[in-house]
Image (spheres, coloured by chain):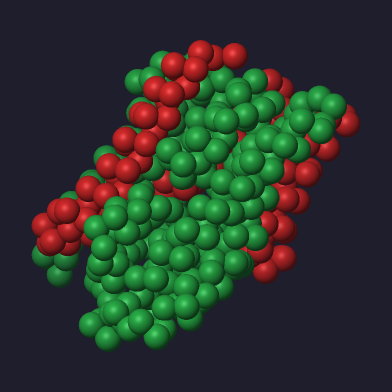
Amino acid sequence: MTEVLTAPAPTGRRTNRPDDRLDDRPTGLRAEVAAGVRDSLAAGLGMFPLGVAFGLLVVQAGLPWWFAPALSVAGFAGSLELLVVGLAAAVTPLGTIALTTLLVNFRHVFYAFSFPLQVVRHPVARAYSMYALIDEAYALTAASPGRWTGPRLLSLQLSFQAYWVSGGVAGVLLAGLLPGPLEGLDFALCALFVTLVLDAARGRGQVPSLLLAGLSFTLAVLLAPGNALFVGMLGFVALLAGRHVLSARRARRA
Amino acid sequence: MPETGYLLAVLAVVFAITFALRAAPFAAIDRLRASRLVGSLARWLPAGVLLILAASTVRSSAAGGRVWQALAAVAVTVVVHLVGGRRTLLSVGAGTATFVLLVNLL
């Protein structure tokens, strides 16, 4: 459980070696699917209860029950879905929801660098594997590259989605049994991000990024309190671009 | 309750953008790998983005005069995560329970 929800720095060059492509061997299919399910269990322990919290939140926000499984199929992105519940309940303009989705999920752009998509052959399966490239799937494949076959990877991702969707439905059902809304439950999202920061920030290498992010968000809260998330992220990317230019110049001088 | 048409539009927007973000880089992966700036961003972006998301959610939890409750729950989350062996479920559960109790009982 310690590794699965972390967001390790993408390593860029760790693609799979040819000997990982064992998905054509028919004899190993069942074993590979079972291995994928086994790989998924630790993260599933965290995803199912968070899904329950998500389902509870959907009902308590005054949204129809079907919105929970529908959003988990449309988006399949835990932290974003929790944010969207609040936005949709307030009938936020679609443009704001689009921008929020873009910013919160933008980190997924970088997952393609080390995700072993090449082990999946069938076009439909490839589309699903890209669609279901959630944080946990990225983290697990990045933590142990080279062990993945098509069936194992797909079984991992399908298991993740099963935990998440069934957790949401369980939450919806549970909400019907509770007498009234339980205030403060949405703190689960905040707590999740806090643990992800702690896991991503291991080692001294991430300190400059964290300082720049903290600086950017603080300035955004002071200068644009209504749009702090958007302005803070934009400022952070700009600061990182500046850092890149500086370190490239330093490397050239050295 | 928001209208069904609006909710369906929300689903469509979330699906289109999320899928595009996850799938598009695979189409351009060779060109992206060659870019040094993209390489730097891939290394530096995740931890900072997570920090901003954490700070932003702390801020919305603290809204409405719940500053110390939110900070206490963050502290519990951090301590449980570092002392309890980084078991995410345990840390998130402890932090959320702390916040729910502080907000509802005090």
Q: Could you say which chain is coloured red in the image?
A: B
Relative placement, left or right, of A163 versus A60 is left
The one nearer the camera, A44 or B59, is: A44
Residue at x 41%, y 83% (from the top left corner): A28
Image coords of residue A103 (percent x, y): 36, 37
Residue at x 48%, y 81% (from the top left corner): A31
Query: In which quadrant will I find the C terminus of chain A?
Result: bottom left
Image coords of residue A140 (percent x, y): 46, 67
With respect to residue A21, does B43 lie above or below?
above
Q: Quadrant of residue A196?
A: bottom right
Number of numbered discs visible in the structure rendering: 0
Residue at x 36%, y 75% (from the top left corner): A149
Q: Quadrant of residue A237?
A: top left
Q: From where the camera sits, is residue A70 visible?
A: yes
Q: Could you say which chain is coloured green in the image?
A: A
With respect to residue A4, does A192 lie above or below?
above
Q: From where the camera sits, is residue A219 visible?
A: no
The one nearer the camera, A3 or A46, is: A46
Query: In which quadrant will I find the N terminus of chain A?
Result: bottom right
Image coords of residue A184 (percent x, y): 72, 32
With respect to residue A158, does A119 lie above or below?
below
Image coords of residue A35 (percent x, y): 50, 76
Q: Quadrant of residue A148?
A: bottom left
Farthest residue to the front: give it.
A26
Residue at x 67%, y 28% (from the top left corner): A59
